[in-house]
Amino acid sequence: MIKLSFNFFVKSNITFGKGAVEKLPEILKGYGLKKVMIVYDGGVKAAGIAEKIVDQVKKAEVEYLIFDGVIPNPTNEVVEEAAKLAKEAKVEGMVAVGGGSSIDLAKAVNVLMTNPGTIGEYGGMNMVKNPCLPLIAIPTTAGTSSEITNVSALIDTEKVIKYVVIDNKIVASDVIADPEFTKTMPVSVTAATGMDAITHAVESYISNEATPLTEYNSLKGLSILYENLPKVVENGSDMEARENMMLGCIITGFGFSNANLGFVHAIAHTLSAHFGLAHGLANACVLPYVMEYNAEACPEKMVDMAKTIGLPVSGNLDEDKYLLAHALKDLIVKLKIKTLSEQNVPESAFDRLAEDVLKEPVLGFNPRQGVTKEDVITILKKAY
């Protein structure tokens, strides 16, 4: 049934295209900021991107503090460390450069700049009370959509969980999307982040919170991403494909930040919390098998997605509902996505992992409800 009563939230101003980073000084001046924190990781620094960002900040005649201690799957401890430095320096805004980890960390730090307590207190939905500082997000990957979503994903090392802060107040004020920056990514990262974006498109389309607007964005994003990901993995210099990947990622982000995600992310969060798996890889290796599982609950939508990516349908719903899952299996093989065993996840951990997956709030948005421990273990074994 189509929902004709819904909310659809969009906030960020987006500057897209080659050379878009040159708009940063103008954006910073527009906010009248005197000092900002620039957040990035070692990879961004090594690629020479950080230097380019700093140069643009200098052009704006804005003081800056650098935090380059971002780690994959950022933890509460790293967030608190960065927030302490930002508060001491009395920064008035944030510039986040990199993939999802850098942008998610900057969002979390931004929460603590205007709200009391520790970041763990803001896990869940709509827990942030006060507006945040201006945040300019500059993605260097085409995968997480963190630059335009209302989500920050973090690791609680004490509870051994990956949790999310979801709040419209944490969305970046501005996005500078320059596809040139994605050229520095290794092939494996391009593949994994691209599969992350495809996971977002697929899960948001079948979410039980989907609306006509989110469905449009999810399908459009899926179409763009599925066509261009193999191209950009095969030829990293294909700038048209890179532009399309970044565009598809943003379009998809509008969909999933409003519709939310599901079972794939429940598993991926748990894998990252226990074994430090990169988020994109954790999603990709279980995606086809979760889609097989979900096909029973939303066969028509599975066919919609199969048609969207150009798969030939027979008209037999019982067969066609699995076409997408089969195509995704072929895609992860083509992209050389590592299996769970290749990512050093021991089969002996499946029982414990399954128990923790069932605690994931995101399961509430999955189209097929009633997920059991045995269901999770079966999917983990298929991905092994």
Image: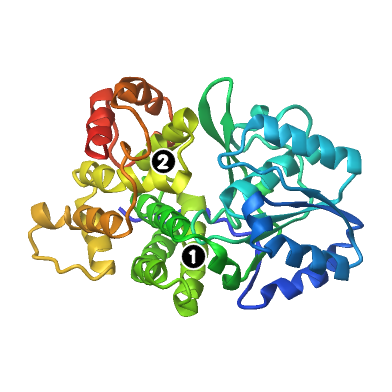
38 relative position to 265: left or right: right
Looking at the picture, does residue 196 appear above or below residue 159?
below
Residue 129 is left or right of residue 72, and the answer is right
Left or right: where does residue 218 sit relative to residue 368? right
Sequence-wise first label, 1 or 2: 1
Is residue 367 in view?
Answer: yes
Q: Residues within 10 Å of mark 2 (few under 14, many from 20)?
A: many
Mark 1 vs mark 2, CA separation in Å? 19 Å
Q: Residue at x 54, y 33 (%)?
A: 163
Instruction: Identify the amino acid type marked 2.
Output: His
- Can the viewer see residue 174 in this picture? no
> Which residue, given by chain and number where applicable, does mark 1 sit on?
251
Quarter placement of the C terminus: top left
Quarter of the view holding residue 60: bottom right
For residue 303, above or below residue 348: below
Marking on residue 265 = 2
**How many marks on residues?**
2
